[in-house]
Image: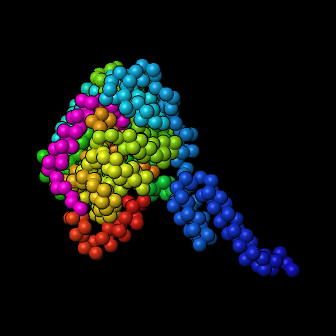
Amino acid sequence: MSPTEAFAASWPFLVGVAELLAVLLATAHVVLRKDNVSSAIGWVGLIWLAPVVGPLLYLILGVNRIERRGRRRRPRPIVARTWDVETPELDQRFVRDPQLAPFLSVARVDNAFPITDGNAIDPLVTGDVAYPAMVAAIARAQRSVVMATYIFDHDAAGAMFADALADAVARGVEVRVLIDAVGARYSAPSMVRTLRRRGVRTATFMPSFIPWTMPYWNLRNHRKVLVIDGGEGFVGGMNIRAACMLSVPTAHPTLDMHFHVRGPVVAHLAQVFAEDWAFATRERLGGTAFASQPSAAGNILARGLPDGPDYDMERLLWKRLALVSHARQRVRIVSPYFLPETRLLSALRLAVMRGVCVELVLPGDNNLRFVEWAATHQLRALVEVGCAIYLSAAPFDHTKLFVVDGTAVMIGSSNWDPRSHRLNFELDLECYDVAFASAMDAVIDERIAASHRLTPEEYAQRGRLRRLRDGCAWLLSPYL
């Protein structure tokens, strides 16, 4: 028998062996690397039921390459990223204050950065307030401006920032702008090209339509960070778009909130941006232009809380679980997208059963219908136990706030959904201060006063078809 005839006779066997080997290797990788049982079972089922397509899809979509790539490109720290226990001085700050003392154990929950003292954080409600403050900060920059955002629209708001950034470059300021590759396409023409044409060093985070980046298409940089001269910063959930300026008529007005930050925690914002910039461009920011050694400016205890599908995986989820489980009096959540995982949903239910007042403020009319339907299905678990759920009136509320027992506050870019906890790169601030928490409680009180409370009777009156629609949308919640 000739070699050709031998191959023709044996190729089905060789293909079968190759398929079996691919299935076994992919299954072994799932078993060794996945920590979610449902996800692991789903992948194993697909791999064995579709022996060719299954392993290929797992190779493209199921393998986390971001952690390895991120470690390789991580720059020299501007500030130490450490999981060590905080200093004795900060421990004493918690112990001496009877309102802070109960949160000492929660503050020690594993995180990327240590708690810092001496911070000031000022809320900026709507783009009408936030954007002028941010543009003014860019205008007074002397050394550097670094900015990351998910959406940077080509509209009145985007033009305002483009002018300020270009002016800073003309003054000799080092400027770096990082825009998510998907968010950059929310408007046309893209602001990326406009900024580059005006001399602003601009990069996109993980372009999603280049063939070799397709495995990362679902992993987006949702962080919103602006740091000026390493000494003052802005962080929150507000994108750069005219819709956030309620004084400007737009098709989809959005109520949102941002924060002006001063103090040592600004170094955490600078470090997170430096890591993202190195990840996207391979440029490592250093030298005096990008140095960040901010001085004390207030009394708030705070630290950066980065989260993403890399070495920071699920840090936000674990911190939220710790705070909800620790709550003794009240848990207050404002979120545009509310699809918590089973662990977090169970923690909220248990908090209500323990006598904790749990209040949830959601948009009454969401801009993403599938998310609204899926969230409505999940609300049953909270409505049944007596959670107070409020549906806000128009405009669409994109605010993200989390306040526990009038002392602990979390602010930033993340939502309460699997995308923020497992897929997106997010950045929140974890804060401890009674005065700041009181100010955030006042904001939530205003939102509740303008909202409608969802009663168990109203929830139960939904028709069968609506319940079926909501349940089907909920099945897709890991991907929304």
Find out whether residue 323 is within the magenta segment: no
Q: Residue 255 location, x and y as percent?
A: 20, 48
Give the main secondary structure, helix, strand or loop, of the magenta stretch. helix
Asked which quadrant contains residue 199, the reply is top left
Could you tell me which residue is drawn at 59 percent across and 64 percent down?
A: 44
Q: Residue 297 location, x and y as percent?
A: 29, 22
Q: Nearer the viewer, residue 18 or 374?
A: 374
Find out whether residue 445 is within the magenta segment: yes
Q: Is residue 410 visible?
A: yes
* On screen, residue 143 above or below 416: above
Asked which quadrant contains residue 23, the reply is bottom right
Q: Nearer the viewer, residue 122 or 39?
A: 39
Could you tell me which residue is drawn at 48 percent across and 54 percent down?
A: 216
Q: Is residue 425 visible?
A: no
Asked which quadrant contains residue 194, the reply is top left
* On screen, residue 260 above or below 462: above
Q: Residue 453 location, x and y as percent?
A: 19, 55
Left or right: residue 351 compared with residue 29: left
- The residue at the far front in this view is 354
Q: Nearer the viewer, residue 223 or 347?
A: 347
Q: Residue 464 location, x and y as percent?
A: 28, 75
Could you tell me which residue is drawn at 52 percent across and 60 percent down?
A: 39
In the rendered image, which quarter contains the N terminus? bottom right
In the rendered image, which quarter contains the C terminus? bottom left
Could you tell me which residue is drawn at 39 percent across and 61 percent down?
A: 477
Left or right: residue 252 compared with residue 9: left
* Span highlighted in magenta in the image: 429-456
